[in-house]
Image (cartoon, helix red, strand yellow):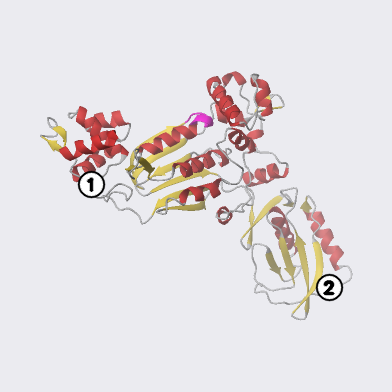
Amino acid sequence: MMESQQVEFKKSFGKEVIKVIITLAAFANTDGGRVIVGMDDDGKALGLQIGPETLQRCLNEIKNATYPQLLPKISVKEMDGKEVLVFEIGEFPVKPVSYKNRYYKRLHNSNHIMSLEEIVDLQQQSLSLSFDAYPSGVLLSSLDQELIEQFFEKANRRGRVFLLDDLFTNFVKLKLIRDGKLTIAANLLFGNPDFTIRIGRFKSEATIIDDVIIDSPLFSAVDAALIFIKKHINLSYHFDGSRERKERWQYPMEALRELVMNAVVHRDYKNMSDIIVKIFDDRIRISNPGRLYGNLKVDDLKRDDYVSALRNRVLAETFFFTGDIERYGTGFIRIREHLKTYPEVELELSEMGDFFTAELRITPPITPPVTPPISPPNGEGVTDLEFRMLELLEDEPRLSAADMARRLQIGRDTVKEYLARLKSKGLLVREGGARSGIWRVTAAGKEMVEKINRR
């Protein structure tokens, strides 16, 4: 036996009484566990002198030093022919538990002081409250009324809740008004949330091509984020003999939407940092402030039987009513389902510092200037952006890179990259100098445009 997340060894209760009680409090705040007294650090039984009053004395010391008071189960066990004391405590229903006004959690095989945010989170979990349910201090008149109407229409179409014409009644029903006051969730969804989503298109970790800051209310922010992402990932067209062409994005859009929605709904809004989305040639990384909530761990999300913990319960329920969330705790199950048709895309989940990160990565990695594998490598097809550029230059051959960037709403570096792709495929040539020259779509390029338009 070794020390672990739920097992700790102590040599004696006398000299190490403080450490024993701290460990029990940490266990109570985490997943529960056992402290075995009379063992050395390597798990070797040393034994104890256990008198008739020992168990009651131990219980009294633990009870007097903890709040809420802990009463662990105590038993005498024999190990290697020697008697040891075993203290067992489950995860406590009312958290956090303190040892002399200090709060600890169990992480791997050691105890750690809890931060103020962790203490608040545990209190909210114990009371079945969430941060977004607290009053916001904003007025109903300050919210975006048009956005609210769009939400009501979408929720009623979905049929999971029936909303009337009365705004105040609807907000009470949705828990967006509590005790007569607008909640934080209401302001986040339809007001001025003071939180942003920062999205950038990168050529490397240090080189950014294009970026945007989305500071709109959450009900519209997800769609705005996906629109920008679509501008910077490839879209292939495939022809399978049917009358219509088939589209295939570089990543499954359903999975991307789930990941962006997950970041918006589950981020820690007590943390003023932004959600960060980075788009590279071969991966998209989405990072949101706030580690996984409750006792949820990264490895749990890789299983289909994981149990979700809701940091922002009102936001989750609101997006559930519109159908943006299907069922609590199923998001990563659906993401894995969407990825089954994209065997070249892998999902990586991690925690670092105060952030949770989800990354979709194309394997094997792409090394520029090689065209991403979903773009036809033999010149027999073009991506959506390449197609749009060919159409644009066929009509206006004198456009500059800056003009194209403005028309297509992409960065100038992206324009230059795709012009180079089209030239390498023999679909576009440059005639004349940089200032006075023109772009000429080749016969092959025109044929490609006509073929796609016919479909």
Of badges 2 and 1, the one in the foreground is 1
- How far separated are the C-alphas under marks 2 and 1? 83 Å
Q: Nearer the viewer, residue 409 or 287?
A: 409
Viewer can see residue 383: yes
The residue lying furthest to the left in this view is 432
Q: Are marks 2 and 1 in contact (CB under 8 Å)?
A: no
Label 1 Cα crowd, 10 Å radius (few <14 / some 14-19 / many 20+): some
Viewer can see residue 399: no
- Which mark is first along the chain, 1 or 2? 2
Q: Position of residue 38 (x, y in %)?
A: 74, 73
Q: Amino acid at mark 2?
A: Ile
The image quadrant of residue 427 is top left
**Disc number placed over residue 50 in the picture, else none:** 2
The residue labelled by disc 1 is 379
Instruction: Indicate the quadrant containing the N terminus: top left, top right, bottom left or bottom right.
Output: bottom right
Magenta part of the protein: which range?
215-220
